[in-house]
Image (cartoon, coloured by chain):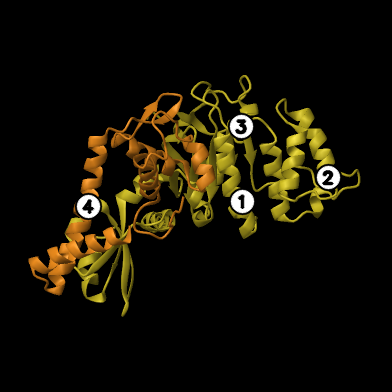
Chain colours: A orange, B yellow
Amino acid sequence: MKLLQNSNTPIYRQIAEQLKEDILAGRLKEGTYLPSIRELAKDLRVSVITTMKAYEELASEGLVTAVQGKGFFVNAQDTEMLKEQHLRKVEDALTEAIRFSEAAGLTDKELVSTLKTLQELRMQGQ
Amino acid sequence: MEIKRVVEAHNLYKKLGRFELNVGELRIPQGFATALIGENGAGKTTLLNILAGIRLDAKGGINWFCGTTDIDKGNTRERIGYTGPGHYYLPGWNTRQIRKVSELLFDNFHADRFEDWCKRMSIDTDGFRKDGKPVSKLSDGNRMKLMLAGVLARDTELLILDEPASPLDPVMRDELNNILREYLAGGEESRPRSVFFSTHNIADMESVTDYAIILAHGKIVEEGFVEDLKEKYVLVKGEPDSAEAAKGILYSFSGTGSYGYEGMCLAADVDRLAGMNVSLETPTLTQISVAVMKKHGRPAA
């Protein structure tokens, strides 16, 4: 896990984001326990409250569940929610693209055709 | 998640000459590392000595391990490991004698673990020889490491460390953070481990600090989990033209040269900076501590 000390994203959120990616990509499987907060803090060389806050964030998003005395385990991820999560990322990225296109003075048509061209290039690449 | 307290104290009071320690409510979370931060003379050592049972003449009530109010009852003292600026090993002792004395003094001292720690912190490199170097010939840093090895070799549930980082070199200070994280991770569900340490140089210990208690002239002036404190305060940097307007809003303020100013703002007041040309950042614990300590500067003599 890569953590940036001087990023504007707090460390706990960086940890939560990376674990979230692992869960959504299926690298952390349903039902497995995450390392204990103190074990993870030791490995990542961060404070315990930092890892605890990261896990609480994942729990609040419904990705993991806390079990008293046992720790946090990965929930079953329903595919609808997965799709929803990804859709939100797509929307964020496209909103960013729209902002740049406005700054560059692109027309709607030009913007859409850029998207299509990129899709085609990607298809060819695969 | 419900958090228990490894030490809780009410109305602690101790007068020493002109100095008064006056702590209404003290709560040290169990299973975490708590830093006691303050300027020299703020009362850190006095408070630690009271909690470690070294100073028994303070007024007020203390509860250790959610159970006992008397440190001399049962095995309470065995469950606590303490290191401080005074060296409690006799100057003539070498590591071999310290190992022997510690085995006699404590039920929970593991000689093999003591040797491992001495090796890991490279204190004793001559294999506990009979004519090994005495404590008096060790540097301050090595003496501190020796005391740490002594407490880490015991099965404890609470470490009370008075300025553990001060005499250590930068590499060892970093290692101390790792060691404390390992200590916390080594606790069990039924016997969680906690650390309470003082420091006047918080930057050295920032990466291990979970909870911070800031002390100024004998009183607690701020405390909280570090992540919460980082949301309570915002670091503000601005151009000189907005300095005067910002001054009235900021919690603390410094520098009005031609390059602008810097200050700490309570997150609750950030909205009032709207329209000013300022940049906002998440402060470090060091920056928060300095701002709080400045705000609560010494009372007029």
Q: Distance of mark 1 from mark 3, alpha carbons?
A: 21 Å
Q: Residues within 10 Å of mark 3 (few under 14, many from 20)?
A: many
Residue B14 in sight in this render? no
Q: Amino acid at mark 4?
A: Val
Could you say which disc has been placed on residue A90 in the image?
4
Label 4 with label 1: CB-CB less than 8 Å: no
In the rendering, at what x and y percent does residue B185 appear?
A: 55, 36
Label whose residue precedes the other's in the sequence (2 or 3) = 3
Is label 4 or label 3 in front? 4
In the rendering, at what x and y percent does residue A16 appear?
A: 37, 44
- Look at 70% across and 27% down and name the residue there: B108
The residue identified by callout 2 is: B94
Discs 4 and 3 share one subunit: no
Is label 2 or label 4 in front? 4
The residue identified by callout 1 is: B175
Label 4 with label 3: CB-CB less than 8 Å: no
- Left/right of residue A17 with respect to residue B29 in the rendered view: left
The residue identified by callout 3 is: B80
In the current view of this chain or complex, which residue is farthest to the left? A108
Q: Residues within 10 Å of mark 4 (few under 14, many from 20)?
A: few
Q: Amino acid at mark 3?
A: Ile
